[in-house]
Image (tube, rainbow, N blue to C red):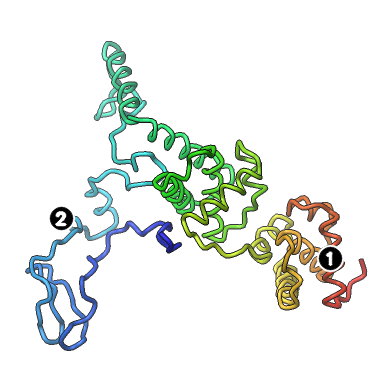
Amino acid sequence: MSNISSWKEADTTFERPILEANSCSECGENVFYDENRGLIVCENCGLVHTEKYIDRGPEWRAFDADQKKKRTRTGAPMTYMIHDKGLSTMIDWKNRDIYGKEIPAKLRGQIYRLRKWQSRIRVSDATERNLTFALSELDRMASNLDLQKNLRECSAKIYRDAVEKHLIRGRSIEGVAAASLYAACRMYKVPRTLNEIADIARVDKKEIGRSFRFISKELKLNLNPTKASDFLTRFISELELSAKCQKMAKKILLMAEQRGLTSGRGPTGVCAAAIYAASILAKERRTQRKIARISQVTEVTVRNRFSELIENLKLPLNN
């Protein structure tokens, strides 16, 4: 699946049913859904486009948010973060019945055995066991990085597609899971480096990089290269610099891109050097050591990129 947006989470709220035709084939005007008769009709000429249209919405009506919440009888929405997409039934770990009363002691042993066998039945074969382990790893790494739910769903979808195309064979589950999470971060333009993913993963950076390049090629993700400006807001926030400093750093990065100074260089190093230069201009100076620690590069890299910016952009700075 080559379209990147297919991995992004779809909106699951109740909406008006999507019409099969957006415009009338006769007069070109809009068509609408007649709820009383189950027809899709042109609002101008009255041409019937579809008869017996199936309404996929709920059979009840709600006039406010509280009423809608009370009348919702379905379970949790489908999620890619669970191996069975959350469609199976789970027995709650609390020893209480449907009315909130505690279960008698003589029945707790039976409930415990039911709960144990139900958890075993949910995972039936080796593929589901591997998927359960991989998705739990994805959730653990995403929690450590404080990533959003839609990004977690996207990473789980990428991993499932890799499993369907048999891309996991010969590679560690942890490595492919970490690569899927890194690919999802690149899709959503969330500034997370490969080093950060490797720090919380149970595999090294090289294996994650190899797995990422392999799955991105086989799944045709077509990800754009990471830019230095993608990390700017995050680094500025962690360094507690002002909006004025951020604006100056953004301007410096734009000038550096126009001069070709970012080509062939690590985006985090260029971003760190631009922030260091902007902090001097805005008189909110931060040390090279602190900026290097936040951006996860060495102080030598910050100094080298900073020297290139001064030399090529003619910045009026005295280091």
- In the image, what residue occupies the spot 70% across and 71% down? 250
**The disc labelled 2 sits on which kind of residue?**
Glu
- Mark 2 touches mark 1? (CB < 8 Å): no
Out of 159 and 239, give the one closest to the viewer.
159
Cα–Cα gap, marks 2 and 1: 64 Å
Residue 132 in the image: above or below residue 107: below
Q: Could you classify mark 1 by the number of other residues whose Cα lies within 10 Å: few (under 14), some (14-19), or many (20 or more)?
A: many
Q: Quadrant of the N terminus?
A: bottom left
State left or right for residue 291 relative to residue 232: right
15 relative to 313 in the view: left or right: left
Q: Return the residue found at the far front.
A: 170
Image position, residue 257 (x, y; %): 71, 74
| Point 42% across, 43% down: residue | 81
- At x 24%, y 67%, the residue is 18
Q: Position of residue 7 (x, y in %)?
A: 42, 57
**N-terminal label among 2 and 1:** 2
User: Residue 30 lies in what quarter of the image?
Assistant: bottom left
Who's the residue at 75% across and 68% down the image? 245
Q: Please, what secondary structure does the residue beneath circle 1 have?
A: helix
Residue 97 vertical position relative to residue 161 in the rendered view, above or below: above
Tell which of 10 and 132 is nearer to you. 132
Question: Circle 1 sits on which residue?
Answer: 306
Give SS at disc 2. Answer: loop
Question: Which amino acid is tagged 1?
Answer: Phe
Nearer the observer, disc 2 or disc 1? 1
Task: Tell me where residue 68 sits by quadrant.
Answer: bottom left
Left or right, 269 with reference to 77: right
Residue identified by numbered label 2: 59
Residue 48 locus on image (x, y percent)? 9, 77
Quadrant position of the C terminus in the picture: bottom right
